[in-house]
Image (cartoon, rainbow, N blue to C red):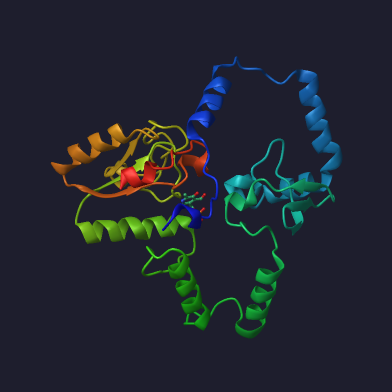
Amino acid sequence: MSQGQYAISEYHDTNEIYAKLNNLIRQPMRPVKREKMKGFLDYFEIHCRRSKELTDEARKYIPGGVQHNLAFNYPFPIAIEKTEGAHLWDADGNEYIDFLQAGGPTVLGSNYAPVREKVVEMLQTCGPVTGLFHEYELKLAQLVNRFMPAVEMFRMLGSGTEGVMAAVRAARAFTRKKYVIKVGGAYHGWSDQMVYGLHIPGTGRLESTGIPRGASAATEEFFPNSLRALKRHLIFNRIRGGTAAVIVEPLGPESGTRPVPFEFNQKVR
Ligand SMILES: Cc1ncc(COP(=O)(O)O)c(C=O)c1O
């Protein structure tokens, strides 16, 4: 596939981004001044009352009051009522620009009419689920294959977490090898084996409360962008069960917030 066919028409200058990031990190910590903070908190108290009421009530029934970690917000989560393209409206009628995009999936914008209309049509004819086959499953698999020819066969799962679990299992079954290597800080869902080196590279099992040690015993991490560190793992694993898979977020760990150079994934392969 030629470079022109990628969805990203202009790849970032990775060095420039890291120079900026490093500049930012070198600056001294600047706490928010007390009176400024009061201003921010007052804003939420006054303008987002309904969100506060709803999520206070939700906390009694839902851990933390929200169903997805992305929805946590300080001083309280915002209850979204309406969406359109790049804009969100909360339960108090405040309008927001949606930089979050559901963490990635709403690439067409929220509530994109052609998708919504088709979904409604499907619900009216077939309901939300049958457990059986529908022609659209074939159409979707064909579309995915057309735009991503490397995806020769396509099985849909309910979440990214499950997709990763299935991919890891398939990789181990196919290669008969043991280890799975991820990039430190990268997120691949919350399955027991993938809660390893989350958020901060090098932290291993730090966030794995409730997960038996054995579950992530064959998971490893390497420092973002360090092909040398990856190579060390690959060589070392050869003598103790082999590497079944190296899993990456293609644009870099934590949704590309630590971006990878253009050739990185190719070099990993
Ligand atoms: C790269 C990546 N893999 C897996 C997941 C997990 O997906 P889900 O939240 O649907 O389980 C995410 C979610 O943010 C992700 O960004």
Which residue is rendered at x = 39% and y = 35% of the image? 225
Residue 101 located left or right of residue 43: left
Front-most of 206 and 180?
A: 180
Compared with 123, 90 (above or below) is above
Residue 67 in sight in this render: no
Compared with 27, 235 (above or below) is below
Residue 59 located left or right of residue 212: right
Choose top left, top right, bottom left or bottom right for residue 28: top right
Q: Residue 68: image x %, image y %?
A: 59, 50
How many discs mark residues in the rendered view? 0
Compared with 193, 259 (above or below) is above
| Residue found at the very far top of the displayed protein | 28
Q: Residue 156: image x %, image y %?
A: 45, 68
| Residue found at the very far bottom of the displayed protein | 125
Residue 102 in sight in this render: yes
Which residue is rendered at x = 79% and y = 30% of the image? 40
Choose top left, top right, bottom left or bottom right for residue 47: top right
Which residue is rendered at x = 43% and y = 38% of the image? 261
Looking at the rendered image, the quarter that the N terminus falls into is bottom left
Q: Residue 262: image x %, image y %?
A: 43, 42
Q: Residue 35: image x %, image y %?
A: 80, 20
Residue 75 located left or right of residue 49: left
